Image: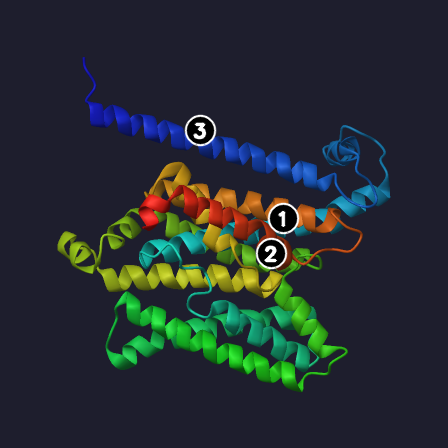
């Protein structure tokens, strides 16, 4: 029996997607183990292996200091970096698909600016690290609420109106943040605000990871389940309605989920750019624009990329490099290269 050419091509693409996803997942697991073995106390991979063998009951005695470093210092920040990278890259892919614009990033609706205002407010009030993260999360959600309320006031629910609302809210939040910097104590509060904006997962605690994990799992699951509807949204408003998709409801759900992912990530790590802009481009270059495949691939790629960045940030120098600085040096040239590869489509 002869297989139709289009069916055969679809099967090849599906198998290629599975192979790529499996390969990236293996690389992610290998990267986690490698990152666990890199640090100032020890760079020996066998020491990390012995810690896990001890936890599984295969060894009777290990270095207790190494066990504490692996489980209480390195593992929390590694898990945080993987989760945050996946959050930002997935939300970036969603925004770019919904708004049909490859230049859109996760902070489109002012989420990052709102979270920065919340964190700065906690710093000025002398709040704890947990208070800072809660206020950053609240600030991000407030920004999204404002950005989605403005189109309702104008009774205009188009993508362009939502983008303009995000620009308005983002600009307003940036001005509020500027006022906070102006009144902050220069030697203490101002430096804390600036350092938080540079991004870091150095002080992430296990409780904070557990706090954002439900948001990550729930929002990512909803977005992946709705991936085929997101494909329809990318066709345009008229085409989607013709097929019978409630564009307003679907778009609202996916935007809220993507904004929750961004706000949760920023509340723990601070402002981190480029990931939500670069990784979806790289995913489309590898697998195409089908969101049923792009979203899972982007999720794993974002976690792997962020893991590499964080490992470099804490091992390249005796002083830890802020994530946003390192990502800018790597992300900007990589994004330029991807635009060059896709220059025909961009033009």
Question: Going from the N terminus, do you reach mark 3 or mark 2 first?
Answer: 3
Q: Residue 222: percent from the left, percent from the top? A: 38, 53
Alpha-carbon neighbours of circle 1 within 10 Å: few (<14), some, or many (≥20)?
many
Kindly identify the residue that appears in the image at 21 percent across and 27 percent down: 6
Which secondary structure, mark 1? helix
Q: Which residue is mark 1?
A: 309
The mark found on residue 210 in the picture is 2
The mark found on residue 227 in the picture is none
Residue furthest out toward the top: 1
181 in relation to 271, above or below = below
Which secondary structure, mark 2? helix
- Quarter holding the N terminus is top left
Which secondary structure, mark 3? helix
Q: Quadrant of residue 125?
A: bottom right
Kindly identify the residue that appears in the image at 69 percent across and 41 percent down: 35
Q: Which residue is mark 3?
A: 19
Query: 318 and 42: which one is in front?
Result: 318
Question: Going from the N terminus, do you reach mark 1 or mark 3 first?
Answer: 3
Alpha-carbon neighbours of circle 3 within 10 Å: few (<14), some, or many (≥20)?
few
- Tell me how far mark 1 sits from mark 2, CA to CA: 22 Å
Q: Is residue 237 visible?
A: yes
Q: Are marks 3 and 2 in contact (CB under 8 Å)?
A: no
Question: Going from the N terminus, do you reach mark 1 or mark 2 first?
Answer: 2
- Tell me how far mark 1 sits from mark 3, CA to CA: 24 Å
Q: Residue 153: percent from the left, percent from the top? A: 29, 81
């Amino acid at each position: 029996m002869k297989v139709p050419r289009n069916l055969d091509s679809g099967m090849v693409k599906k198998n290629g997607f599975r192979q790529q996803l499996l390969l990236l997942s293996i690389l992610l697991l290998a990267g986690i183990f490698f990152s666990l073995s890199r640090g100032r106390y020890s760079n020996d991979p066998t020491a990390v292996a012995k810690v896990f063998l001890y936890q599984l009951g295969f060894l009777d005695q290990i270095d207790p200091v190494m066990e504490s470093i692996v489980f209480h210092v390195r593992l929390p920040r590694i898990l945080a970096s993987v989760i945050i990278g996946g959050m930002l890259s997935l939300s970036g892919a969603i925004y770019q698909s919904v708004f049909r614009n490859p230049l859109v990033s996760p902070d489109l609706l002012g989420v990052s600016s709102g979270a920065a205002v919340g964190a700065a407010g906690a710093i000025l009030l002398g709040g704890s690290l947990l208070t800072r993260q809660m206020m950053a999360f609240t600030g991000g959600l407030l920004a999204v609420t404002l950005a989605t309320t403005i189109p309702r006031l104008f009774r205009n629910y188009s993508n362009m109106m939502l983008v303009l609302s995000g620009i308005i809210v983002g600009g307003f939040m940036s001005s509020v943040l500027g006022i906070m910097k102006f009144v902050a104590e220069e030697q203490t509060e101002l430096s804390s605000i600036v350092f938080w904006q540079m991004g870091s997962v150095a002080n992430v605690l296990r409780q904070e990871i557990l706090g954002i994990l439900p948001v990550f799992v729930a929002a990512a699951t909803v977005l992946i389940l709705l991936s085929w509807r997101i494909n329809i949204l990318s066709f345009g408003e008229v085409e989607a309605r013709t097929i019978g998709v409630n564009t307003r409801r679907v778009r609202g759900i996916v935007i809220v989920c993507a904004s929750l992912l961004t706000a949760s990530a920023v509340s723990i790590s601070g402002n981190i750019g480029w990931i939500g802009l670069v990784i979806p481009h790289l995913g489309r270059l590898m697998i195409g624009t089908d969101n049923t495949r792009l979203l899972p691939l982007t999720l794993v790629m974002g976690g792997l990329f962020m893991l590499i960045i964080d490992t470099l940030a804490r091992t390249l120098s005796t002083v830890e490099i802020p994530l946003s600085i390192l990502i800018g040096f790597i992300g900007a040239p990589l994004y330029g290269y991807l635009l060059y590869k896709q220059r025909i489509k961009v033009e």
